[in-house]
Amino acid sequence: MNPLPLLTIGATLLAGVLGVIGVHHWSRGRAQRQALVERMAQTGLPAALPGRRRRFAAVDRRVRRTRYGRRLERRIKATGLDVTPGEYVVYAVLVLLVVYVVVAAVLTPYFGVLAALAGAWGANAFLTWQQQKRTEAFINQLPELTRVLANATQAGLALRTALAMAAEELDDPAGQELGIVADQLAVGQSLDDALGELGDRLPSRELIVLVTTLILANRAGGQVVSSLRNLTQTLEERKETRREVTTMLSQIKVTALAVPLLGFGFLLMINTMTPGALDEMTGSLTGQIATLIAIGLYTVGGLLIRRMSRIQV
């Protein structure tokens, strides 16, 4: 007797049962959500939070349970990106797969693996770059921030009220970050802890000076207005100095980026001039080791150039 028809019938029945169970759970969840929305509407609360609909909710829940997910969530908050840890992980994996397929098709599968590993490092470097970019934007707003705080405190407002007012008047990222501080103060968190968390999210020398000045003024009193005025002038001078240094070092930064790109260009040129040369080169252990050494030398060269061009202002 042929068991294939019985297996087909059994699989069909199982799929039907699972489908009915899924529809039942979906309808029950939808009814519960509707009831929750109605209760929130009766109490005057908003029925839904503003913002876009989040994707990959199941993946996000699993990622958040891990230590890496919690650390990733803190880093994403510091960057200001509107993405959840689960979305970031899914997007990063998809990009790595695309990079592997493209590089493996253009060069060799061996270079595809190396490109995927470089892409994994690049995903982490992207978050670092976004955090640094946000920190730089916040530093550029510090003179305006201290000026607003000085004017508010001179008008007789409390420091907590001045921070809330600055959050409304300034653009992002300063407005958003100060809004977080104002919300923390509104729920009873101390000023020292709220400003300390702000310094942890956006680490910089200028912000540390501002946070220390505000904390000391809040604890011991004193001339807050004069301190903020002097700090505003100092931050304006540092802002101009940082801009001049960035302009002077722009050529060196381009060189640091061009060094590894030249190596990749040489690989494309070799593969175009002699088809199959890269397959032969990476087909042996000696060729693979030599390739890793060459990539390491290019990487070290680029890092050394960037290190020599790094000037702390």
Image: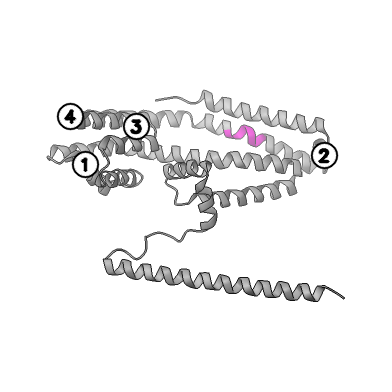
Residue 209: give x, y in percent of width and height: 30, 28
Can you tell which mark lies on residue 277?
2
Kind of residue at disc 4: Ser
Q: Distance between the residues labelled 1 and 4?
A: 18 Å
Q: Along the horizontal axis of the image, is 165 left or right of 126?
A: left
Say which of marks 1 and 4 sits in front: 1
Q: Is the magenta stretch mostly helix, strand or loop?
A: helix
Q: What stretch is highlighted in magenta?
A: 257-262
Quadrant location of the C terminus? top left
Q: Is mark 3 on a helix, strand or loop?
A: helix
Q: What residue type is labelled 3?
A: Lys
**Residue 271 appears left or right of 39:** right
Marks 3 & 2, CB-CB < 8 Å contact:
no
Callout 3: few (<14), some (14-19), or many (20+) C-alpha neighbours within 10 Å? some
State the residue lying farthest toward the top.
308
Residue under label 1, please give it. Answer: 160
What residue is drawn where x is 42% and y is 45%? 77
Q: Name the residue under label 3.
A: 239
Instruction: Say left or right for 77 vs 167.
Output: right
